[in-house]
Image (tube, helix red, strand yellow):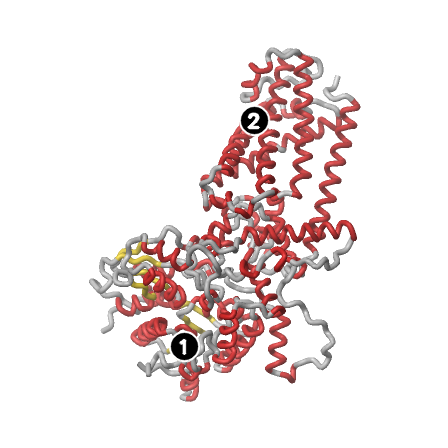
Amino acid sequence: MTALSLTQSLLFSGLTVLAISLVAKRAKMILRTIKLGRSEQVEGPKIKRWKNVLLLALGQQKMFRKPGVALLHLIVYAGFIIINIEIVEIILDGIVGQHRLFAPVLGSLYPLLINAFEALAVLVLLACVVFIIRRNIKSITRLQSNDLNGWPKKDATIILGAEIILMSLFLVMNASDTLLQERNHLGYNQHPTGNFWISSLLHPFLNNWSNQGLVVVERVSWWLHIAGIYAFLNYLPYSKHLHIILAFPNAYFSKLEPAGKMENMPAIQQEVIYAMQPELAPTDTTTNPARFGARDVVDLSWKNLLDAYSCTECGRCSSVCPANQTGKLLSPRKIMMDTRDRLEEIGKTLGKNGAWQEDGHSLLHDYISVEEINACTTCNACVQECPVSINPLDIILQLRRNLVMEESNTPAEWATLFGNVENNFAPWKFNPEDRENWIHPA
Amino acid sequence: MNIPTLASCIAAGKSPSILFWVGCAGSFDQRAQSISKAFALILQRVGIDFAILGKEECCTGDPARRAGNEFLFQMMAYQNIQTLNGYGVKKIVTTCPHCFNTLKNEYPELGGNYEVIHHTVLLQQLLDEGKIRIKEGGVFKGKRIVYHDSCYLGRANGIYEAPRKVLEMLDSELVEMKRCRSNGLCCGAGGAQMFKEEEKGNTRINKARTDEALETAVSIVAAACPFCNTMLTDGIKGAEKEESVKVLDIAEIIEKGMITE
């Protein structure tokens, strides 16, 4: 007899197809919204990009700027990925209606593997408990910030809770299974695995249960475990947890040039050349002027939009931001969250109408205020700190360009600065003739 | 002091090996002028053949670009590149990390290709080559010095070691702030903030950074940027510590600490 009846097998296959098609639909939507961004050339050697994927995404190099949390994070990440190898067996079991399909194939290696998975499961579970505690004590300001009010806070708790539940189900499933094997119960006795170190510690709680009761416990844990994983998979692309996937492309596409270099605007460069050398200017002037800087997410580059979806709202950027740390309104994390929220808003109309139309909203003003972007010192601390290579500064600077060049909206002192640079070739109102006075003071 | 302009050099048929890009702060700001002087003095003592652009030098456009005015930046870049290319400039040294970043990283794609180095890197080279030698028992003997990382040297261009290597040559004690190198806190001047009032907050950025510097109980805060220098000097005045703590540029420190024979 097999562990799964035909009905269970069919139900399971149906659930698998549903889970995968739903997540594929969502992935397609995200890809579509990212593609709304302006094109941006990816420059620099591929070998350096792959190195970034290995070091920053897989190796989590920047996380280790805070070693304690990094270790816990690595446990959850590695543990979760490795334990999910077990999913392959569970899915195959579910589809072909077998129980522990790999046990006879792997022989004595099998219990060793499951023992290792169980040890990791306990570590993941404990790490998640520590994370929940950390999130709810007052001492870590970046986790208490107003940026996270509402959904973001709930999102984080849901993820941690889900991981704890999934890990517990895995252990309960193994405990009830091995107890049924011990009792030589039909359907559980064809591939005896022996007890596992950690789940067998749960046996005292299950010893009094009847075989039928244990089968129910085992089946329910099995179903909830796999359904839970499918649910998690579908929750992922709606949550900040998407970073576990997007960290990889984001590391690959991250900027390789010196962080201090600002993106050039060839259209304006050209215009200045034409102004200076009119003989070069084209006679045909019917081309539509490009947008200056960014007013909305569609004016940003696709890399900025990928950044927004890769953000896990950890707040390391804001915790090192000089403006944020001195009480200014600017928070680089909020810049990324706003960009994502605006993208989601656009994604909804895309879903309804098939195409995006102006909806009267924009990232600048409706989501991000002038006061926020004017507080930035362009110090690159946020860029340096981000574990998944997000660049909030790039967005801030594009918004500033739009404010100045399309709205002429700039602080009075900066207007003076512009005037001085234009007329006196220096940011202060000094006579350009006095430029050498430092050598021979008057 | 006599410093030739590139125009006069070319007219005399000479081509100096390096151009000293003084920058607007170095030219006009009273405090930064003494940094320019100290650095020029070092170059002269070492016998480096250099010139300045003088009246032909314009703002690189850095603050305009970072405040959002790309037109103005492109205009300044166009003018400067015309001048530099016209003279066939190959190598530039500058005491300002903002000018350094713009000249080195942002001018090449606009047609301005030069070897650009920051003065702290040149000073390290000159010390390594033995062209600058430090006095024993000089004015900095036994003094505690802390180096403040400029964002545009450090995170923006990965230069963390050169300024420290230079300071380590002195017989003084080099200490670090809690936040240093890639973790260093900005002085508050970058991104054109130097030229406007800070946005509303609960404290000033330069005060926060000055407090970190004062925690190290030093008598000298070493800077490598004229804007950091201004911000930290203001911070120290605000803390009423200007009698016991001085902010000095690395060029000023080396100028005072080197053997001059």
**Residue A212 position within the rendered picture, expressed as x and y whole percent measured from the top left:** 69, 13
Q: Position of residue A21 (x, y in %)?
A: 75, 40
Q: Chain of mark 1?
A: B
Q: Is residue A48 left or right of residue B45?
A: right
How packed mark 1 is, by other alpha carbons closer than 10 Å (few <14, some 14-19, many 20 or more), is few
- Residue drawn at point x = 78 percent, y = 53 percent: A354
Q: Quadrant of the C terminus of chain A?
A: bottom left
Residue A248 locus on image (x, y percent)? 60, 47
Which label is found at residue A118? Answer: 2
Image side of residue B237 versus residue A330, left or right: left
Q: Amino acid at mark 2?
A: Glu
**Quarter of the view holding residue A281:** bottom right
Q: Amino acid at mark 1?
A: Ser
Q: Which quadrant would the N terminus of chain A be assigned to in this image?
A: top right
Circle 1 — which element? loop
Specify the subunit that label 2 lies on. Answer: A
Q: Residue furthest left?
A: B137
Q: Which residue is mark 1?
A: B17
Disc 1 versus disc 2: distance between alpha carbons?
Answer: 68 Å
Q: Examine the rendering and report whether any part of residue B43 can be seen.
A: no
**Nearer to the camera, B88 or A74:** A74
Residue A373 lies, in percent from the top left, at: 54, 60
Vertical position of residue A76 compared to residue A252: above or below = above
Q: Are marks 1 and 2 on the same chain?
A: no
